[in-house]
Image (cartoon, rainbow, N blue to C red):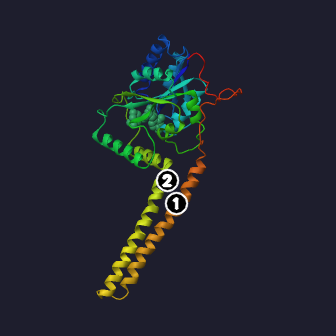
Amino acid sequence: MDRLAIVVPCYNEEEVLKLASKALRDVLEDLVQKGKVAEDSFILFVNDGSRDRTWELIEEEHAAYPVRVQGVKLAGNVGHQFALTAGLVTAKDMSDVTISIDADLQDDVDVIEEMVDKFHAGNDIVYGVRKERRTDTFFKRTSAQAFYKLMHLMGVKTVYNHADFRLMSRRAVEEFSKYKETNLFLRGMMPLIGYRTDSVYYDRKERAAGESKYPLKKMLALAFNGISSFSVKPISLILSLGLFVIFISVIMLIYALFSYFSGHVVAGWTSLIVSVWFLGGLQLLAIGMVGLYIGKIYMEVKQRPRYNIEKILSGEELPSGQDGSTRGEDR
Ligand code: UDP
Ligand code: MG
């Protein structure tokens, strides 16, 4: 039977913590009853340097439910993406499968069962995808949509309308932990892992209590980080712009010569205007060229895994953990 860990990053969540704990414990109890997850499945709360009573509440819950509720206390606030990563990496050594969910119960805990079913059906990653954004404000909805469009345009593969509510098998988290980059954008990284994936759909609710910890400033930072961590397209745009301006300079050359010979110009204008366009284009082109190399260096320093072997068919015994059989035989 697979041991499930539900990883919950928490930053100043004293208002919802007990609610979240209760809701998730109920889900776990139900799954255990139905024999879908192991008896000792648990919730792992990650306290992301909260300044309120969040950690005390986690300790209380752990004291009351020593098996069901576990906690990790980070030394300071590192932000949602890092807190979640800390939780997943900690949980992977204690469990066979993880589910990450926000503390505010905006994501529907009732689809967790469906996620687990899809895991048992052989999927390594199951994405929680929002059906619609009825509860979001008009602004949040349109800005989010623009964000996904822009990401797509920049060539970053993401799952549309999926945030960080997702199931991951142990081997998926293990593969993920090989990504050593510090600019984390989890949603963009998961599709790089590979393996079979699936999605479950749900309606996103209002926050159960408390306020959003993602003000516009943090949202924009996340969006910018997402693009700049996964795409060097902005650099190649400079290169294309340089080529385009050089092309314009040729047109300007023809136009300027034409004006010159028809005698309508002030002395010196022709050579000046042609040089301005040509030099401008040349500079952009040069910056773009330098940028291409920087883009390559950027991709190199990330040292991302280049591939992920799922299975090998050969006569020899493979050391355990390398043949995809780490998930237990009883499934
Ligand atoms: N969070 C965190 N560290 C932070 C900010 C947020 O761990 O610095 C957690 C927060 O407690 C919540 C999740 O990240 O569980 C998502 O935050 P929130 O619900 O405020 O974002 P929103 O749903 O408004 O985008
Ligand atoms: Mg939220």
Q: Quadrant of the C terminus?
A: top right
- Tell me whether the residue at label 1 lies in contact with that at label 2, contact meaning CB atoms closer than 8 angstroms: yes
| Residue 28: % across, % down | 47, 17
146 vs 194, left or right, is left
User: How many circles with numbers are drawn on the protein?
Assistant: 2
Disc 1 marks a residue whose amino acid type is Gly
Is 117 above or below relative to 77? above
Whether residue 154 can be seen here: yes
Residue linked to disc 2: 232
Q: Is residue 208 left or right of residue 72?
A: left
Nearer to us in this view, 253 or 50: 253
Q: Nearer the viewer, residue 22 or 155?
A: 155
Q: CA distance from mark 1 to mark 2?
A: 9 Å
Write down the residue under mark 1: 291
For the N terminus, the quadrant is top right
Residue nearer the viewer, 144 or 71: 144
Q: Does residue 77 appear anywhere in the picture?
A: no
